[in-house]
Amino acid sequence: MKTTHILACATLLPALSALPAFADDGLVRPDELIADASLAPAQRDAELLAARRYATFWHTGDERYARAALAPGFTDRTLPPGRAQGVPGPLAASRFVRTAIPDLQADLQQMIVAGDRVTMHYRFHGHFTGRWAATQGRGQAVDFIATDIYRIADGKIADNWHIEDNLTLMQQLGLVAR
């Protein structure tokens, strides 16, 4: 069941649809949402919308969602070596990973909204049937977690701090010994 908690508020909302930002819009919904009750509803809804658009990008690979979610001056604060800074970075990363794992999905397990920050916890899963650099997949299952912290400004993700379980991913791809 999807749950919503509003911090500093005794009311537990029965469903995410109780929030305006969770109308039936086709965007990914978190399994659990924790939101700071002191936020103005317009700010909270803008932050939720930007974060859900970006989550939908990671879930589907549809770049329209990333472009709608990310600020023009988007900065990846944990930029891996070789990845372009700004909006082109996550677009290229998604394309690369989806070449190896075409059925990749990102389930949004938890979303925490506080101040101008949104923290997202994902579970990525799919099957390695494509290529990862020089390695051809054999259909093995892939299942790993990632956590992002976004700073939202003017309804867009301006900064991202990201960490994922790359060791588990590399082991599942057969690129690193278990």
Image (cartoon, rainbow, N blue to C red):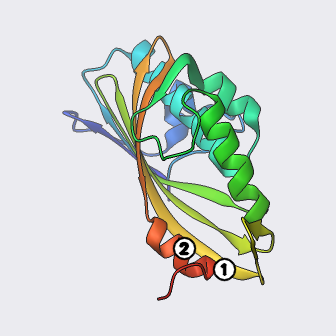
* In this view, the mark in front (2 or 1): 2
Specify whether residue 24 is in view.
Answer: yes
As displayed, is residue 11 above or below residue 114? below
Q: Residue at x 51, y 48 (%)?
A: 30
As displayed, is residue 64 above or below residue 98? above
> Which residue position holds label 2?
170
Specify whether residue 101 is in view.
Answer: no
Measure the C-alpha gap from mark 2 to mark 1: 12 Å
Q: Is residue 68 left or right of residue 85?
A: right
Residue 70, x across and y down, in percent: 57, 24
Q: Residue at x 78, y 84 (%)?
A: 138
SS at mark 2 in the image: helix
Mark 1 is surrounded, within 10 Å at the Cα level, by few (under 14), some (14 to 19) or many (20 or more) other residues, namely some
> Which residue position holds label 1?
141
Q: Is residue 39 left or right of residue 32?
A: left
Residue 88, x across and y down, in percent: 65, 31
Q: Is residue 93 left or right of residue 62?
A: left
- The answer to which of marks 2 and 1 sits earlier in the sequence is 1
Q: Residue at x 59, y 34 (%)?
A: 84
Residue that extends furthest to the bottom in the rendered view of this protein: 178
In which quadrant of the rendered view does residue 102 lie? bottom right
Using the image, tell me which numbered label, if any, was put on residue 17: none
In which quadrant of the rendered view does residue 37 lie? top left
Q: Amino acid at mark 2?
A: Met
Q: Amino acid at mark 1?
A: Ala
Residue 107, x across and y down, in percent: 57, 57
Q: Is residue 134 left or right of residue 72?
A: right
Residue 115, x across and y down, in percent: 28, 24
SS at mark 1 in the image: strand
Q: Residue at x 68, y 57 (%)?
A: 97
Q: Nearer the viewer, residue 25 or 131?
A: 131
